[in-house]
């Protein structure tokens, strides 16, 4: 039994607990269906098709200005570089498991003379004390809401306010990695603009909870976005036309922005089912967004055949991969449209089978 | 009379001498029309939809491997960085008007510790003597075929071979900026692979002569492309899905790769028409690709009302902008599908009007 068997059984399962369904070319066809073919393409950042969406997102995020980027990787490195240039100080602070530190092949450090300071223990959120204990000046603090690599945890709103205020009073720029910001809003009972006002710059993604094809928005004040435009060209991100992603982002945003509370409720329901199984636990125990991590006290090689058998029996795929973790295994669950399509009977059967098969291990 | 009037009259003209027609959302709809909606999206550089196209382009360019990039700006900076790293020497040479020097907000210099050496006078092509006169070691030489900013000029094939051989014998890596490589092939009577073998790395674009939405291919040996994959992620170019551009690039490539000889013939015909008008000249006098620059011995403000009146009379737009140049004006002509759609009578009328109106100035 190897990972590719798990992945194969998962891909063959008609139902998945995570995501919005298969990522196929149909997504783009659907997004284009109601578009007027005669609408002009955007051209190097200009034209209604990009400008209208940027204004819509600036307003939604409560910022003066916003710019569409092909990726969050590009947008966030640029945000930090702008803040470092503005402060003439090339140090930033972020969580040890943030996207820039572990998923970007050290792009920030390879492309810029920026030194990141890792705040907090990797296993927990950045708290007020971590920020207060910074022993050297920094230009910017990056906070990721939710902190994906620890299961999508969130600080409470008061902590956010306190960290933000501490930074503002010391002229430390506050950047929000809001790859999953939309997914946090039901927990905070806040608008995106209310969260956004605690930060000088905000990045959001359109292919996580929103379920678009790709792309990101970076938002901030006018001066910041003007500088971002120059850096976007330097990176080769100022494509002659970005509309295929914008059309999809806009369509997906309108279709799913109202569903975040449902995804959050579904995540809590599903996490409770996992936590009812011996050998399983979730992080966080009660999700605060649409996501959580499922942990199993069995190695991947022990658990894989169990999962494959269950996917084949019930038609429900839980995950296509397992990562070794603390002597056991873990996988990520991220609720989208797919969960609501699963009939209740096979879902109950899945957890009954998990319970009996894992008790027998 | 200002540039926006010229631009407006141009946009209202039903016929344009350059390009493939309006860049609208319909381009993407058309490219998707025959695609199976159930085809899986690419995922971070993997999947048939990206891999098949990359193999097709590697083969076409005569290279071991190829990688799709969102932009040529990103692809070329990365190519030069890889060659500098490999030689542990952070100097490259290129033409003073190459894309990296004048259109990328100094991205190469801002993102990498690379110092470019400008070869040759801006008004002419790089020749063998320019390369031989290099007084310091360089890691790589970038050649742009054709040299767009001087009207799309080309060195003869023997010069290319000589420059390439000189570099190879000194372990200088040879990078081809082939943004318009496809457009050169009829002049050289060579395949892309025959030109490509004179270079260690090749970049080609899909939204110039090919007429796709955006995107680029970088090709070279396997080791080179593996490193390019790492840098693509660092830049934020490793999007979860690039298929909207790939679908369009592939569709447009198949549709137009066989038309380059026609575009080249059309460019020669059209340049001869311009050269028949007093006050006009083209650079080069006889085009060697689908493009040329038209020069007029009148300032933009003198020539704009003449052009606007002619566009309105004949329905044929020659250009939407004029750049001041040596006390006169210039604009770029780049032949695509649009030229062949122009009826002959209004075309003759356009040049008759140009002749009479300019003689009267």
Image (cartoon, coloured by chain):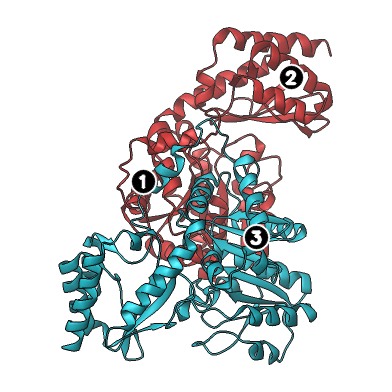
Chain colours: A cyan, B red
Q: Chain of mark 2?
A: B
The image shows residue A227 at horizontal and vertical percentages of 73, 59
Q: Residues within 10 Å of mark 2 (few under 14, many from 20)?
A: many
Q: Secondary structure at mark 3?
A: helix
Instruction: Identify the residue shown where x is 55% and y is 65%.
Output: A73
Q: Residues within 10 Å of mark 3 (few under 14, many from 20)?
A: many
Residue B156 in the figure: left or right of residue B279 = left
Q: Secondary structure at mark 2?
A: helix
Measure the alpha-carbon separation of dots 2 and 3.
45 Å
Which image quadrant: the N terminus of chain B? top right
Image height of B279 relative to B290, above or below: above
Residue A179 seen = yes
Residue indicated by mark 3: A61
Image height of B281 relative to A293, above or below: above
Residue indicated by mark 1: A26
Near-viewer residue (A55 or B95): A55
Could you tell which of marks 3 and 1 lies nearer the N-terminus?
A: 1
Residue indicated by mark 2: B307
The image shows residue B301 at horizontal and vertical percentages of 83, 26
Instruction: Identify the residue shown where x is 66% and y is 39%.
Output: B149
The image shows residue B29 at horizontal and vertical percentages of 43, 36
Q: Nearer the viewer, mark 2 or mark 3?
A: 3
Q: Chain of mark 1?
A: A
Residue A153 in the figure: left or right of residue A201 = left
Near-viewer residue (B17 or A49): A49
Co-location on one chain, circles 2 and 3: no
Measure the alpha-carbon separation of dots 2 and 1.
45 Å
């Amino acid at each position: 039994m190897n990972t590719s068997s798990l992945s194969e059984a998962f891909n063959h399962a008609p139902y998945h607990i995570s995501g919005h369904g298969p990522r196929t070319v149909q997504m783009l066809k659907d997004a284009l269906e109601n578009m007027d073919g005669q609408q002009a393409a955007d051209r190097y950042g200009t034209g209604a098709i990009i400008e209208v969406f940027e204004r819509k997102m600036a307003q939604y995020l409560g910022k003066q200005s916003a710019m569409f980027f092909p990726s969050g990787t590009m947008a966030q490195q640029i945000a930090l570089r702008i803040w470092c240039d503005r402060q003439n100080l090339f140090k930033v602070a972020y969580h040890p498991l943030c996207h820039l530190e572990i998923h970007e092949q050290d792009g920030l450090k390879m492309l810029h003379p920026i030194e990141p300071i890792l705040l907090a223990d990797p296993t927990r959120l950045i708290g007020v004390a971590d920020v207060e204990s910074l022993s050297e000046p920094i230009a910017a603090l990056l906070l990721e809401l939710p902190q994906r690599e620890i299961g999508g945890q969130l600080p409470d709103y008061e902590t956010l306010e306190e960290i933000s205020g501490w930074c503002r009073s010391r002229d430390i720029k506050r950047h929000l990695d809001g790859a999953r910001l939309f997914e946090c809003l039901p927990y905070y009972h806040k608008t995106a603009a209310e969260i956004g006002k605690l930060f000088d710059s905000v990045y959001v993604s359109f292919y996580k909870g929103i379920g678009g094809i790709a792309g990101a928005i970076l938002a901030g004040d006018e001066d910041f976005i003007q500088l971002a435009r120059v850096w976007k060209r330097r990176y080769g991100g100022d494509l002659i036309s970005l509309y295929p992603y914008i059309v999809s982002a806009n369509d997906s945003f309108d279709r799913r922005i109202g569903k975040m509370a449902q995804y959050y409720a579904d995540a809590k329901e599903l996490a409770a089912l996992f936590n009812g199984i011996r050998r399983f636990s979730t992080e966080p125990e009660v999700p605060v967004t649409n996501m959580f991590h499922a942990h199993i006290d069995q190695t991947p090689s022990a658990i894989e055949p169990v999962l494959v058998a269950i996917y084949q029996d019930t038609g429900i795929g839980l995950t296509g991969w397992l990562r070794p973790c603390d002597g056991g295994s873990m996988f990520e669950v991220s609720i989208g449209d797919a969960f609501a399509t699963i009939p209740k009977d096979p879902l109950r059967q899945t957890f009954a089978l998990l319970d009996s098969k894992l008790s027998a291990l």
